[in-house]
Image: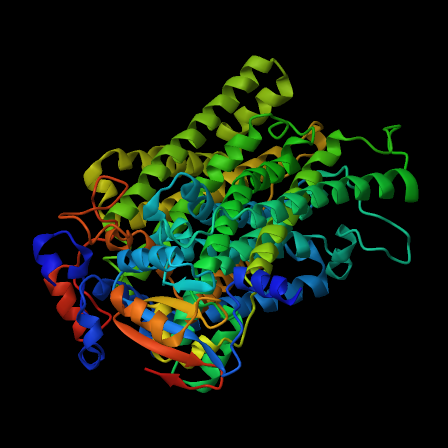
Amino acid sequence: METSKKLPTDPSESPPSPAGDGAADPDRLVKGNLSFHDITEMVSRHAEKKAPLAWYVAFGVSLSGALLLVGLLAYVVWNGIGVWGNNQPVGWGWPIVNFVFWVGIGHAGTLISAILYLFRQHWRTAINRAAEAMTIFAVICALIWPTFHVGRVWAIYWTLPIPNQMAMWPQFKSPLLWDVFAVSSYFLVSLLFWYVGLVPDLATLRDRAKNFWRQRILAFFSLGWTGSNRHWRNYEKAYLLLAGLATPLVLSVHSVVSFDFAVSVIPGWHTTIFPPYFVAGAIFSGFAMVVTLMVITREVYGLKNLITIDHLEKMNIIILVTGSIVGFAYITEFFMAWYSGVEYEQYAFLNRAFGPYAWAYWIMMTCNLITPQLFWSKRLRRSIPVMFALSIVVNIGMWFERFVITITSLHRDFLPSSWGYFTATWVDIGTFVGSFGLFLTLFLLFLRFVPMVAMAEVKGVMPQADPHYHEHEGNGHAEGDGEPYIKPAEPALAEAYRSNDAEAPD
Amino acid sequence: MSTLLQDLKAQAGIFESDADQIHGLLAEFPDPGALLHAAETVREEGYRHFDTHSPFPIHGMDEAMGLGNATGVGVLAFFGGVTGCVVAYLLQWWTAAVDYPLNISGKPFFAVEPSVPIMFELTVLFAAFGAVAGMFALNGLPRPYNPLFYSDRFKGASDDRFFLHIAASDDEFDVEDSAAMLQRLGARHLELVKDDGTVDA
């Protein structure tokens, strides 16, 4: 405790462990250790105690959405995909729009866990676990669409190179098949990355488990982890390698998704700008989704001194940057259409902005290019209500971007006699809403059963985790500007925390 | 041969108990710095079969324990990546050019250019498998049974406690002497862990 008096910014001022626990063990009074335990306590207890009522309400709503999805997909399989609005000339409709939308959302998780790790951005530790979980769930939601869009879902295994009685192989020259490999590799690597990060935290839960079966199940998944330094050294290497592998992978995945469009010869699709522009858009929408989810999570679970306003502000800056890149790409596309001198290309873009889908185009422009510019103001990007509203607006805009790209280019192709107007059906709307239900169901299960913040990583970036911390006067942290990465708690928060109530004042 | 195997297992933190079922001494230290210095001294005293346990990796611990750079994971990831790349190339070439050639618009049956995306994806995928499987293999995980789990205090190693474990299989190990040394190094608590499930404080 002496240390904390000397160092007002020391995180050991963070809320003490709940009464009874600390009192029983005199060792716990040793300075510096207090806050490591607090991290454990703050994060693990949500996976251990009964979920708050809000969780059950949210879970009920989400689960109904997921069941709606299951029911409607059965309806689609039974009747054929004609019950969606897909028809000539728009064969790709909402299923492909939704696929690109969900894959894009997933990308922020990998960006946070891999790219920010390589750049040594320690603030990522507060949000990387939840963002990676979001990645996995978003990719699951994404994979549903092409799987059912093939129409004969029982033949989907034809996309994989499995020897079969027809002696046929997949067509490896098709970008659609590249997509199968890219997205499924992405899913598997994200899952591995997430699980490797989870092992030490599952061991923490295992060691805290009181119930026999809970202890056994966690022991199974934590693989006998003991925090051995002989293990940590290989573990850190593997984690670094996974980050290094996931970084080019995530950039390649959305590039390959954009090839689905760019490798065709449809005006409005056949452009070389697509890969970087899709990747920027994916990061943009993914970060917005992380902000939406984290604002709610930190509020409900009282994690405001782990997921701080500074973390959210940094994410908002990334939203501003990527949003501007996307907006720049929209304008560049127009310039290239004009500069190419190809009349089909020029028509495709004029038709986007001023044709029958102008409404969708201008929703996209407003939500993606104009409203994120509000984040130039420091006050606005640090305001919770503003960022929450804007993050939702961004995702509306990004859904419309995919709608504009997919629908407007298809509905008027080279031959005016085959032009048409695409209208979504109730099944389109129902399945899309249902996919949100599935996503939120999985995310709520994650919040309930898995440590939602990477405890071992957060502890590792705290100043007193540095072995030389206790040797010097002041903050002897080896790297950074001496600022702790974990905000010290406010006294009011400590009180609320002690009273064992998840509701914490800001 | 058996010593070699023992040393190999010790690299992964798997130590054998001695004839009296003694697994080793488990010393708890107050903070990462104390643990680092203790590990340094224990190595200088000539111990080799020892390990430290902490809730997060401690910077400089590899040097303090004399472990050197961990290259195994990287090598395995590299071979995983090479395997993935070769598999993707052979798969696309053999299926399209050998097993079932299809003439599509007179294009070549096989070309490298359209094969690049899948070669890239499988390289990354197999390298990731290599890194993760290699990491678990080199760490001797999963390892459901570990005598250290008999210690209740050791549960804190995943929370906020810092342990140094000297295994009974070490040539230098002596219950009295080793305990005295750990005491001198500032161990806050000492336990003798036995393989028969008992722990003596």
Foreground pick, A211 / A501: A211
Q: Nearer the viewer, residue A33 or A249?
A: A33
The residue at the point 43 percent across, 74 percent down is B24
Residue A432 in view in this figure: no
Q: Can residue A303 be seen in the rendering of this structure? A: yes
**Residue A404 x %, y %:** 53, 37
* In the image: residue A379, left or right of residue A267: left
**Residue A100 location, quadrant:** top right
Q: Residue at x 21, y 66 (%)?
A: A34
Residue furthest to the left in view is A5
Instruction: Please say if A254 is above or below A67.
Output: above
Q: Relative to B16, is B95 on the left or the right?
A: right
Q: Is residue A64 left or right of residue A487?
A: right
Q: How is the image coloured?
A: rainbow
> What residue is rendered at 17% in x and 48% in y?
A472
Image location of residue B109, percent across then percent down:
87, 33
At 49% across and 46% down in the image, what residue appears? B69
Q: Is residue B102 left or right of residue A195?
A: right
Q: Quadrant of the N terminus of chain A?
A: bottom left
Q: Nearer the viewer, residue A283 or A201?
A: A201
Camera-nearest residue between B82 and A275 = B82
Total number of numbered discs in the rendering: 0
Q: Position of residue B78 (x, y in %)?
A: 63, 43
Horizontal and vertical percent position of residue A200? 43, 64
Q: Which quadrant is the C terminus of chain A positioned in?
A: bottom left
